[in-house]
Image: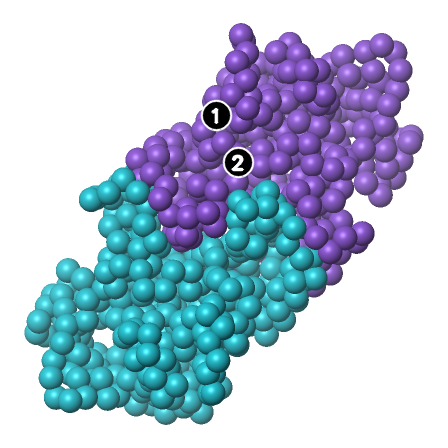
Chain colours: A cyan, B purple
Amino acid sequence: MKTDKILLGHGSGGQLSNELINKVFIKHFSNKTLDILSDACILKINQSHIAFTSDSFVVDPIFFLGGNIGKLAICGTVNDIAVSGAKPLYLSTAFIIEEGFSISKLEEIVKTMAEEAKKAGIKIVTGDTKVVNKGKCDKIFINTTGIGSILEKRKHIGSGKNIKPGDKIIINGSIGDHGIAVMSARNDLKISSPVISDCACLHKLIEKSFEISENIKFMRDATRGGLASILAEIVENKQFGIEIEEENVPVKETVRGMCELLGFDPFYVANEGKFVMIVEANDAEAIVNMLRTQEFGSEAAIIGEVVDKHHGKTVINTSIGGQRILDMLSAEQLPRIC
Amino acid sequence: MKTDKILLGHGSGGQLSNELINKVFIKHFSNKTLDILSDACILKINQSHIAFTSDSFVVDPIFFLGGNIGKLAICGTVNDIAVSGAKPLYLSTAFIIEEGFSISKLEEIVKTMAEEAKKAGIKIVTGDTKVVNKGKCDKIFINTTGIGSILEKRKHIGSGKNIKPGDKIIINGSIGDHGIAVMSARNDLKISSPVISDCACLHKLIEKSFEISENIKFMRDATRGGLASILAEIVENKQFGIEIEEENVPVKETVRGMCELLGFDPFYVANEGKFVMIVEANDAEAIVNMLRTQEFGSEAAIIGEVVDKHHGKTVINTSIGGQRILDMLSAEQLPRIC
């Protein structure tokens, strides 16, 4: 690494994160299960397969349009389990709280978590609370770690082992909403049509997708690093490429406007209620049609396909007729977005 | 609650922690599994019983005699699984790192974690890394969440459901070492015989105890809040009491000296390599004799027993012939001890 200092970009979910994971964490922790580096790992305990995943949430500010750090902490981990192909069952919640933080705000966050967990049908079964001196953390950080049960036939969904050229790429709605909502809350930007975070639990959409098709090859929620970073990760070192049709990727006008104003590319802005799904071509339309009837899928679309060219690269066919390569996020665009 | 502000004591593992857990977390999250409030909860997935536990580590300083935050993060969670009667299998690790933190120090911590996990036979299978801006956290916080497998017959060990008057109380060695080691590192106290943290994974001691006895009724590692808080928790609202013989409780001379100097009671000082075990009287001596042959059990002792008097209270028979009641830690003695 070029520096001995941790940079904000090391937590971006992009290229620097990748480097840190490989050069520090994998270097020492390496094992067959960890090295797959999917959002949730798949474990076999006795005769049962379970999905297991952990995320810490440090979003700033802790309240934003469409959610708060607590909702994020539930949905984020529920989604990591669900995109691995598993059914979310249990969550742990661990709080690190700054001395002096308001107990009523804490309770508001906890209440949201309870409501969201109830809606998702997931139980919070264990937890931990630490308090650090004033100034030693920023209000509140929450870790949620989750367990789900997964059918053996679905155990490769998280790793994308079965992706093949010809497969279609689906997204369940518009990109960039969460990042822009948090950014707006942070800067207290007065915007006429405010952007609301898309933060939501997606396991029901996914359950319904499995009812339609057992040919779902891969899913991942497009959080830190945005849609672009997920697509870049999928093709990394692979003998296939991805082509995305820009005009098919839903972006809300307000989000597009804010991105232009702030100099962001919506493809790199974080989402908290969007999954990328790769599915056998024949089943893609039926899934999208179903998704469009659902609360968190009304703008679902086929946005591209896996191709047997430009191996290892994601190419976007732009609306104006050009092509550009979507790399992984290289630095940090929006720190503490989740 | 008397105040709307989070106090350091809310993270102490004592009375204020208890209050926060009940009045905020249990109030909203309540369910049969969570409400048991043991260190690890027991889940049934398909036909398998598993133990599940989460802890965040915010120790200050992050390096101390006998360990660092990484060793603590592995041992703490391994121990929480092991004292529930389960075999530790898998861990997640989630890092929150301050911008500007040294990557080589991070690697040193990660290396210790890898070594400790390897020794413990537990696999690190998933993880997460967040980076927050300089000044928004204190160097590094680590969450570890663990899964173990547990035999059905042992599933009540964490809750202590089977404790009965007459049962003996065992500890595997001297108390207060960890708290005093961290305190010394924090203040850079120059002491002639320094205290070394007892931070260690205890699952092997526990495995060996089960080889001797299936009559282990309860175990808990005596971390935050020290031995006293664990004992107070065990008897809380119960139809039995506990009597402890002070002279049988091992305390190192250096720890006793430091406690006198700093005005601490070693019963309330945190340990990171000590468990309290409650076992049927007949099996107690055999277990202690075995423990004394082991690396982390050489000073093991029977320190008291469960009694059918002073219900709900832990009474200590002092070395000078008096009696005092051991309450739960009421405020915060040593913040950020783990």
Q: Amino acid at mark 1?
A: Phe
Residue at image point 36% right, 88% down: A253
Which one is nearer the viewer's eye here, A61 or A143? A61
Give x and y (percent) for residue B67. 46, 26
Quadrant (top left, top right, bottom left, bottom right) of the C terminus of chain B: top right
* Secondary structure state at the residue bearing disc 2: loop
- The chain identifier of the residue carrying mark 2 reads B
Mark 1 surroundings: few (<14), some (14-19) or many (≥20) residues within 10 A: many
Label 1 and label 2: CA atoms lie apart by: 10 Å
State left or right for residue B205 relative to residue B267.
Answer: left
Mark 2: amino acid: Val
- Vertical order, A295 against A112 (above or below): below
Could you say where residue A331 lies in the image, as x and y percent from the top left? 26, 59
Disc 1 and disc 2 on one polypeptide chain: yes
Horizontal and vertical percent position of residue B104 = 30, 35
A232 left or right, relative to B162: left
Relative vertical location of residue B298 with respect to residue B86 in this rendering, above or below = above
For disc 2, the neighbor class at 10 Å (few under 14, some 14 to 19, many from 20) is many
Name the residue rendered at 79%, 22% in the picture.
Answer: B244
Residue B59 is tagged as 2
Name the residue at the left extreme.
Answer: A309
Q: Is residue B198 visible?
A: no
Q: Residue B291 sits in which quadrant?
A: top right
Q: Is residue A293 above or below residue A35?
A: below
User: Which is more toward the observer, B337 or A308?
Assistant: B337
Secondary structure at badge 1 equals strand
Chain bearing mark 1: B
Q: Earlier in the sequence, mark 1 or mark 2?
A: 2
Tell whether label 2 touches label 1 (CB within 8 Å).
Answer: yes
Q: Position of residue B219 (x, y in %)?
A: 66, 34
Q: Which mark is residue B218?
A: none
Question: Which residue has dot 1 on it?
Answer: B64
